[in-house]
Image (spheres, rainbow, N blue to C red):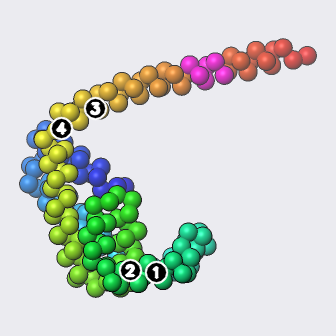
Amino acid sequence: MPEEVPIVAAGVLSHAEVFRWWLALCVILAGVLAGDAVLYWASHHWGELLLDWRVVRRVLSRAREERLKAAYREHGVKIVFTARHVMGLRAAAFIMAGIVRVPFWRFLAVDAAAAMLGIPVSFGLAYFFADQVYGVLRDVHRIERWLTLLAVAAVAAWLALRTYRRSRRP
């Protein structure tokens, strides 16, 4: 699950006074860092095996892998810091950090520093704009009802057409 979902949910629930905001923020930060540490640890121990999968090799040739590893050895800390703020790149960057053996203490320190910048901003935006989130959710539920009605009508039309065609066969 992308970490943005629990961050925004915690911000909205804190605004609704379900959680204390400071406790929710601490738990979110701890959970995010724990998840990142698990990615690093798993790739540190089994990452090279992942790179030998046929599906991975179709995307990541040996030459490209070597260029990526060289870039990590030279700019690993910068890559980890930047990737922390880019959904979709984050997991791959943290996995590669484990594979190229960026020291764990350095990985965790840079990741924590980047998380201390980005996560409170996301949490704060969700907290302060929770009223708009409720409005968006209300609109989403309205659209879901219309889509459900449309789907039921489409299934009913398909069944009616199918029944009509079968009744016309000799």
- Per the image, the residue denoted by label 1 is 67
Q: Is residue 140 above or below residue 163?
A: below
- Is residue 39 among the parts visible in the rendering? no
Marks 3,1: beta carbons within 8 A: no
Question: Which numbered mark, 3 or 1, is in the foreground of this view?
Answer: 1
- The earlier-in-sequence mark between 2 and 3 is 2
Q: Are marks 3 and 4 in contact (CB under 8 Å)?
A: no
Q: Which residues are magenta?
A: 153-158
Question: Mark 2 sits on what residue?
Answer: 71
Q: CA distance from mark 2 to mark 3?
A: 42 Å
Q: Amino acid at mark 3?
A: Val
Q: At 36% from the left edge and 80% from the top edge, which residue is drawn?
A: 72
Q: Main secondary structure of the magenta part?
A: helix
Q: Say whether marks 2 and 1 touch (CB < 8 Å).
A: yes
The one of 110 and 27 positioned closer to us in this rendering: 110
Q: For label 2, count other residues whose C-alpha is less than 10 Å away and answer few (under 14), some (14-19) or many (20+).
A: few
Confirm or deny contact between disc 4 and disc 1 (CB under 8 A).
no
